[in-house]
Amino acid sequence: MENPLDDIQLPYTVEDLVKTLDKVYPNQAPDIKDEDRVVWFKAGQRSVVNWLIELKKRNENNLLGEG
């Protein structure tokens, strides 16, 4: 069976990279069937995406003269 992530290419822009990571590592509640270590691993992945989203927002606000 083919992995759907095999078709993903490295995006050209930071905005596209953040969008791709947001799709690959969605912000969702843990599955009750997941073991503790899997939950923490997924939380760590999402934490990186959230951090990049926050950096992008800060950069956009600075460009707009906000904050």
Image (cartoon, rainbow, N blue to C red):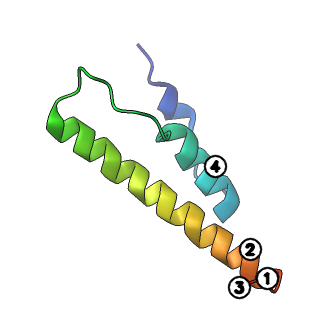
Q: CA distance from mark 3 to mark 2?
A: 10 Å
Left or right relative to 52: residue 37: left
Callout 2: helix, strand or loop? helix
Say whether disc 4 or disc 3 marks the residue closer to the N-terminus. Answer: 4
Q: CA distance from mark 2 to mark 4?
A: 15 Å
Q: Residue at x 23, y 20 (%)?
A: 33
Q: Position of residue 67 (x, y in %)?
A: 71, 85
Q: Are marks 1 and 2 in contact (CB under 8 Å)?
A: yes
Where is 22 relative to 61, above or below? Answer: above
Q: CA distance from mark 1 to mark 2?
A: 5 Å
Where is 10 relative to 59, above or below? Answer: above
Q: CA distance from mark 4 to mark 3?
A: 24 Å
Q: Which mark is residue 63?
A: 1
Mark 3, residue position: 67
Where is 36 relative to 41, above or below? Answer: above
Callout 1: helix, strand or loop? helix
Q: CA distance from mark 1 to mark 4?
A: 20 Å
Amino acid under disc 1: Leu
Amino acid under disc 2: Glu
Of 38 and 31, nearer the camera is 31
Question: Does residue 13 appear in this view?
Answer: no
Amino acid under disc 4: Lys
Mark 4, residue position: 19
Question: Does residue 10 appear in this view?
Answer: yes
Q: Which mark is residue 43?
A: none
Q: Position of residue 51 (x, y in %)?
A: 48, 64
Q: Nearer the viewer, mark 1 or mark 4?
A: 1
Say whether disc 1 or disc 4 marks the residue closer to the N-terminus. Answer: 4
Say whether disc 2 or disc 4 marks the residue closer to the N-terminus. Answer: 4
Callout 4: helix, strand or loop? helix
Q: Position of residue 29 (x, y in %)?
A: 40, 33
